[in-house]
Amino acid sequence: MRRALSLVIVVLLVVISYSARADVTSGPGEGNAIVKFQVTVVAGESSGKELDFVTERKEKPTVFVFVLADKFSRPMARFIKVLDDKLKAERADVDIVAVWLTDDVNKSKDYLPKAFMSLKTERTAWSVFSGTKTGPENLGINPDADITVVVSGGAKAKFSKGYLSINETEVPKVFDALPPKK
């Protein structure tokens, strides 16, 4: 009986510590404005252009995915691909803007078209932020988060969350945070 109780306690501690480690505060926070910022689009629609997607998308719902380039992983790629497929099937009014945060902008500009070709996304603009690795000023990107997901309904955040790890199991939560289809 003691062994069983000890095992249950250990399992609970592991689950609690994993849950606490899975998310970090990152991004502008729900209800707050998403500041305008420029990126260079290197793959997907608008490739080769410098854009401010906050202004470009206006009131259209958008999922911004801020990725620390040196933390990019297969599970992150899977998250983006599954979300892209779900948007393509169910919400053609929503686009993903994947923003690479890096110290080596040129390396990312070379890499991202290869990732785009490999993942075959249709609703994702792959872009590079050429400012600091912590992302656009006043956007609150936490450098401890490997990836930050921000859902906008226009220029305001509807969902804002940082992850130390992510995979496709988070897609339903992000999808449910989208503003209703008009």
Image (cartoon, helix red, strand yellow):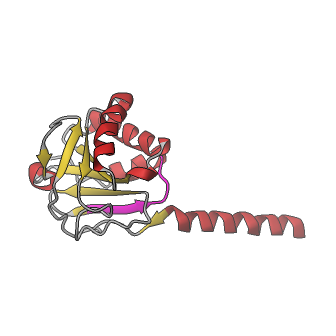
165 inside magenta stretch: yes
Per the picture, the main secondary structure of the magenta-coloured stretch is strand
63 inside magenta stretch: no
Find residue 7 and report its horizontal and vertical position in percent: 80, 64
- Is 122 rendered above or below residue 35? above
Residue positioned 38% across, 29% down in the render: 118
Find residue 108 and report its horizontal and vertical position in percent: 32, 44
Residue positioned 33% across, 44% down in the render: 107
Q: Is residue 1 something that shows in the picture?
A: no
Residue positioned 9% across, 54% down in the render: 55
Q: Is residue 9 left or right of residue 75?
A: right
To which quarter of the image does residue 161 belong?
bottom left
Find residue 140 and report its horizontal and vertical position in percent: 30, 69
To which quarter of the image does residue 66 belong?
bottom left
Q: Is residue 36 left or right of residue 14?
A: left
Q: Is residue 20 left or right of residue 5?
A: left
Quadrant of image for the N terminus: bottom right
- Is 139 rendered above or below residue 102? below
In this rendered view, identify the residue nearer to me: 35 or 110: 110
Residue positioned 15% across, 37% down in the render: 46
In this rendered view, identify the residue nearer to me: 120 or 62: 120
Q: Which portion, as a residue range, is magenta?
A: 158-167
- Is 57 rendered above or below residue 48? below
Find residue 143 and report its horizontal and vertical position in percent: 39, 65
Q: Is residue 20 something that shows in the picture?
A: yes
Looking at the rendered structure, the number of numbered marks drawn on it comes to: 0
